Image: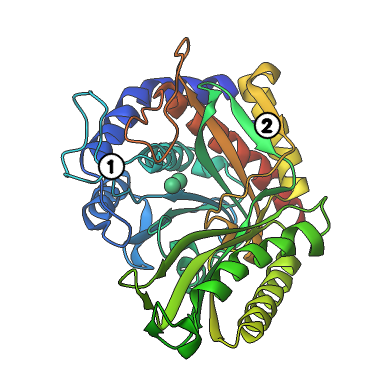
Amino acid sequence: MKYDMEKIKQRIDELFDEAVAFRRELHMHPELSEKEEETAKKIHQHLADLGITYQPNVAGHGVIATVYGKNRQHAVGIRADIDALPITEAVDVDFASKNPGVMHACGHDMHTAIMLYTARILNEMRDELPGSVKFFFQPSEETIGGAEQMIKEGALKNPDVNSVIGLHVETTVPAGSIEFVLGPMNAASTEFYVTVYGQSCHGASPFKGVDPLLPACAMVSNIQSIVTRRIDPTEAALVTIGQFHSGTKNNIIPAETRFSGIIRVLDMKNRYFIKEELERICKQTAASFGAECKVEFVDSYPSLTNDTQLTEWVKESAEEALGKDKIRIRTRASLGADDFSYFCHDSRALYYNLGTARDGEEITAPIHNENFNPDEEAIRTGILSEITAVLRILEEESKDW
Ligand SMILES: [Zn+2]
Ligand SMILES: [Zn+2]
């Protein structure tokens, strides 16, 4: 790489304490999804101080910052989510959350601080950059998927973005290391809601009505045959029922039973197949008991698959910057979901894991846990990996501009 890596590392070291302080500021004042107003203001303030152009209020409280390089029509995108979770923090640190019941327990404060300082350093290097860089400070990852809305509002246009990268904290990887997942990484998620309609009557004379509980229980079992008998077992898919509600009293046959759950798949074709099968099984099971049912679906995030070419470039640049021993490869996907996946469907994209496990710590609290407490050393690794990734992608993509 033609850039002076030592100089970049030195600049990160100089700014490290400031980046940590910014992360702690965000950590102390976490805001729930769709309510990231003060967080956005802090981002605006920093960008304005740095003289970086930005567009506020994208998809709610999202912010898009742009650093213009030599080519102003083409850019590489980076995304950081900025929202927090409804969790009461249990970590005993002096920068613990001051917002009762709200906590940055998914590391989005880390993501935001890392990307802001990546923007700061790339802005200082803008005269050397062959193209531009867009920074997506994205709201509402934990609820409605701010990524989709940002893309709808034109995030990938003007300058045009062909490739987007993003990182997420990972507590199973040590701080200082990063992990790439080859190919499929996260699942597509769909929620389903089933209502079984019967006819209520006295529990001592069930023959006078139609019991909706019995067909509903049969459905819960029958649905599991989709994954075990209708999907290729080498493909990952699951159906989980998380809620089941019915009735008001021991001796009343209720009029209806409701249950709901999630479908997760890595391959989008299985999303449509499982929805069809689930509806068919529920309808036919209901009919066999003389009951009726309604099945509703709400599609959430699509699947997240990493682009092979981007993975190769970014892995190489990370090996060069961090050392080969700091790079991990995972070939197995998770059926978790993340709205970064929208970028995979509208551009090519790469999501990678940033290790945050503390050296020598026996038990590391996972994300979404009230004890989650990442090693801030990961901020240094995060900034360096983002900068080197962007430089490499710009170098490769600018050959075609
Ligand atoms: Zn989360
Ligand atoms: Zn997260």
* Sequence-earlier tag: 2 or 1: 1
Q: How far apart in space, not on screen, are marks 2 and 1 (Cα)?
A: 33 Å
Farthest residue to the front: give it. 204
**Residue drawn 73% across and 66% down?**
270
Residue type indicated by callout 1: Met
Horizontal placement of 287 versus 156: left or right? right
Q: Which circle marks residue 40 in the picture?
A: none
Q: How many marks?
A: 2
Instruction: From the viewer's side, name the closer residue of 368 and 259.
Output: 259
Quadrant into which the C terminus falls: bottom right
Residue tagged 2 = 317
Q: Return the mark for residue 103.
A: 1
- Taking depth in this image into account, of 124 and 256 the one nearest to the observer is 256
Residue at the location (53% across, 53% down)? 338
Instruction: Tell me the element at label 1.
Output: loop
Q: Is residue 31 left or right of residue 210?
A: left
